[in-house]
Amino acid sequence: MKTIHDVVVVGAGPAGLALAYDLRDLDIDVQVLEADGDIGGRTRSVQLAGAPVNTGAMFIYRGTRAEMLAKKLGQETAPFHPATYGVHIDGVTSVAGSTPEIVERLPLPTESKTALVDFMEGLACEYRDNVSDGTITDKAAGLAKETVADRLDGLPGPARSIIETAVRGGAVGDAAQLSAKYALRYLASYIAHERDSRLYPVNGMQALPRALAANVGAGTAIRTGIRVGNIRELDGLLEVSAASDDGQEVLLARHVVMAVPAPLVAGICQDVPLWKREALRAAETPGSTTLTIAANVEGLPKFADWSFVSTVGKKFDAIINPQPGVLPADGIVRFTCYGNSAGFIPGIESDDQLIREWIEDFMDVAPQLRGRIVDAAAATWEHCFSVLSPKRNAALPDLQRSVGNIHFAGDYTSETAGSHGAYQEAQRVADTLREALAQRTAKPATAGSPASDW
């Protein structure tokens, strides 16, 4: 007779692992199934020149559940204290502490320079008006209905390209998708040199999911290399069909939680109703590629002061140094180049030629670092983070809504998206499951009772 699991979680990223952690005090059977060979999803960290660097998610945001979990699980963090902003366009890189100084050095017509300064300083003012202690306030709610592109009409071409590139570098998605509300976090905060919103996990973003996995309940099993192909209702339970190198298997569950990127959900839960499919389509989750670079900056301390540099016309859209102002003892600064416009590039991780091409683009932006590259590594994601668009914001109630005993948790069901949103969504779904499991304990369901509203 098959074991009936209380909860099967599909996906061992931040949402799936935080959910298992949140249920740790219950005497229940939880199975977490991950298709990849490792846990953590898009928080993946790698060792580069002897230190961890992040290849996907970069920061833990203050005031979020991610910060609370990091503190509870003893994760060391350092504040992100930017003092500069930068732009690279047409062979010129300008990094400085003030917007007028940055723009003055750029090879732009006077009209474009004036418009760009006005736009960037206007963004910084809007940021300060809508943010308190690094957190977006309710005052910004109305901005969720418009996109950054709505603000760009009339901005001269070169100036517009700089802003559009910065949007792609700071967020997954473009100016026509990203809401003006979350442009405050992923664009304006860098221009405003926000010092109170971001924390850098010293041991890498993946350290927190690993800590969660190490502290789940005794009844929880986390299994990697297990790809779930289909979920269907069967006699009041949910049948989960999965495959691994060891062959096919079927699990029976009372509840299933889908903690995978939105584009994968409908292919696994093939019988979900039309309203759910339409909501999932609104949760656009494009691909992305990153290159992390370790460079020796001894004698060139200005590169340690870089924080965010948007890069027009390069294979990547932005360079982020998550510890600006810090010159490590070994003299090596580790940069992450975010290629959100590049999308998913399968095989780049082992493609030396492609990696060299990306490094050459980095050298164009920072020519003084030629010959100083110590190490580099590429990563690519078919489905990166969900875009914070007005369309997805409108679909959130349906994205979060359960379909019978199938529940949905991830950055795609979160108002804020990203790994911080995924951690929060885990708590929401954990609360739903606590209530449902308590009801089952109080009044056991009869065999064959309906498990869903499919």
Image (tube, rainbow, N blue to C red):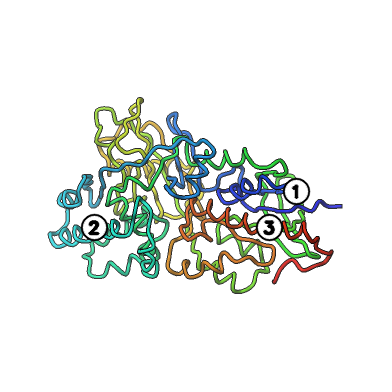
Q: Is residue 264 above or below residue 248?
A: below
- The location of residue 396, given as percent across then percent down, is 51, 66
Q: Residue 428's spot in the image, x, y percent? A: 58, 57
Image vertical order of residue 44 relative to residue 437, above or below = above
Q: Give the residue at x 35% y 29%.
A: 328
Q: Which mark is residue 347?
A: none
Q: Which residue is mark 3?
A: 256
Element carrying mark 2: helix
Q: Is residue 131 left or right of residue 278?
A: left
Query: Judging from the image, what secondary structure is the residue with disc 3 in?
Result: strand
Question: Three-letter amino acid code at disc 3?
Answer: Val
- Pick the residue in front: 103 or 394: 394
Q: Is residue 118 left or right of residue 369?
A: left
Q: Amino acid at mark 2?
A: Met
**Residue 164 seen from this side:** yes
Inspect the image, locate mark 1, and give the three-letter code of the amino acid beneath it: Gly
Identify the residue at horizontal 24%, vertical 52% (top origin).
89
Question: Residue 283: where, in percent of width, then height?
Answer: 50, 64
Depth check, front residue: 343 or 398:
398
- State which tag comes first along the sequence, 1 or 3: 1
Mark sitting earlier along the chain (2/3): 2
Residue ranking furthest to the front? 442
CB under 8 Å between discs 2 and 3? no
Residue designated by label 1: 247
